[in-house]
Image (tube, grey):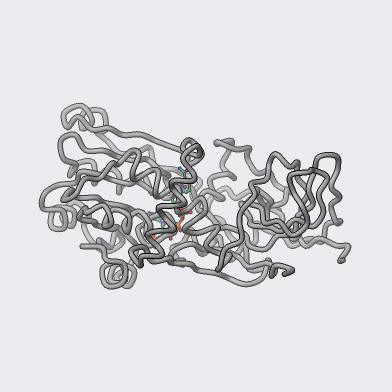
Amino acid sequence: MTTSNKQILLAEKPTDKLSVDHFKLSEGPMPAAGDGEVLCRTLIISQDAANRAWMQGKTYRDEIGAGQVMAGGVLAEVVQSNDAKFSPGDLVEADGGWQEYFAKPAKELQKRSPHDPLTNLLSVLGVTGKTAYFGLLKIGDPQPGETVVVSAAAGAVGNVVGQIAKIKGARTVGIAGGAEKCNWLTSELGFDAAIDYREENLFQALKEKCPDGIDVYFDNVGGDILGAVLFRMNMHGRIACCGAVSQYDTGNPAPGPRGVPGLLVTKRLKMQGFIVMDYYKELEKAEADLTQWVNEGKLKVVEDVLDGIESAPEGLVGLLAGKNRGKRMIRVAEPSS
Ligand SMILES: NC(=O)c1ccc[n+]([C@@H]2O[C@H](COP(=O)([O-])OP(=O)(O)OC[C@H]3O[C@@H](n4cnc5c(N)ncnc54)[C@H](OP(=O)(O)O)[C@@H]3O)[C@@H](O)[C@H]2O)c1
């Protein structure tokens, strides 16, 4: 077995837009598993918009500091285990970071069953698919015939939200950057309409494409898009606050949309934030439903896989600039069997 461990460090914290120059490739020592720990080999790194938010300060996890291995969810294979629950060859999901090998306490690992293709374990059956599933169904609760709007609709979480909304019989409108992504949402993924937020006047476009108003908004972006959607919400509408990607990759986050309290009151809106882990006691049901929809051909899995750990910095910078379609991942190594 190799004795070195390729790692990508966050060399410097960005004060404004993230660039590849904020990262540094490094060769660290091979980690060893201590008592109760498990040594793992990274197979696939998940790239998430939230990776950038983790550089801004403490969130639901610790802030990533300069000089640290870049944090990130991974799918990995157990190499050696000092815990009875794990054996070599097991597949696990963990916050392993951007590195080829890591050792972690067993309680920080989630065992995963083999799946073909493996990438699905981080996309539709990973945090991405479950975030879409729980946020939409638990908070949005879309009813047949209602209008659901989702932002960052061509991204990892957003495309799954739109497709589940269709499965639930809702009229679905996606907001995304660029005509190409918008055409793809309607022609390939079954969205009823799409809005290019970069080119179109949002207030006008929402009026035209949501003629009956909006009942559910799945908010991935915050900022001005949230502000515009709020004005088009129907009475008793629901807003699932999933994230605020428009505010992550900047040194100057916007103060937030105006008039929110008044609109919430007069329209009797429910606006709720969530973190996917809040619903993990219902993980099995989510995985079963998502698997069934994929197998029935009702839910298309959209993956955007780059090869080699060295491509991770460019992958994340590109994701924040909208270069991805669906779930972006970095394939680091093939499983041993
Ligand atoms: N609450 C939770 O538990 C949870 C879990 C996972 C993810 N999330 C959240 O889900 C959201 C989506 O994350 P993801 O990892 O799936 O990323 P993603 O949607 O695959 O990628 C981010 C997308 O955001 C769009 N974007 C970037 N800047 C934007 C801006 N200023 N305004 C509007 N859109 C912009 C880009 O697409 P365009 O080309 O369309 O601009 C880009 O493709 C994020 O807010 C993330 O924090 C939350």
Res 233 → quadrant: top left
| Percent of width and height locating residue 299 | 36, 63
- How many marks on residues? 0
Measuring 24% from the left and 50% from the top, which residue is drawn there?
A: 148
| Percent of width and height locating residue 154 | 37, 62
| Percent of width and height locating residue 122 | 54, 57
Image vertical order of residue 1 relative to residue 172, above or below: below
Q: Nearer the viewer, residue 144 or 302?
A: 144
Measuring 33% from the left and 43% from the top, which residue is drawn there?
A: 137
| Percent of width and height locating residue 35 | 85, 39
Horizontal side of 75 relative to 284 (left or right) equals right
Quarter containing the N terminus: bottom right
Measuring 17% from the left and 32% from the top, which residue is drawn there?
A: 267
Res 163 → quadrant: bottom left
Horizontal side of 141 relative to 54 (left or right) equals left
Quarter containing the C terminus: bottom right
Measuring 74% from the left and 48% from the top, which residue is drawn there?
A: 86
Horizontal side of 335 relative to 192 (left or right) equals right
Res 184 → quadrant: bottom left
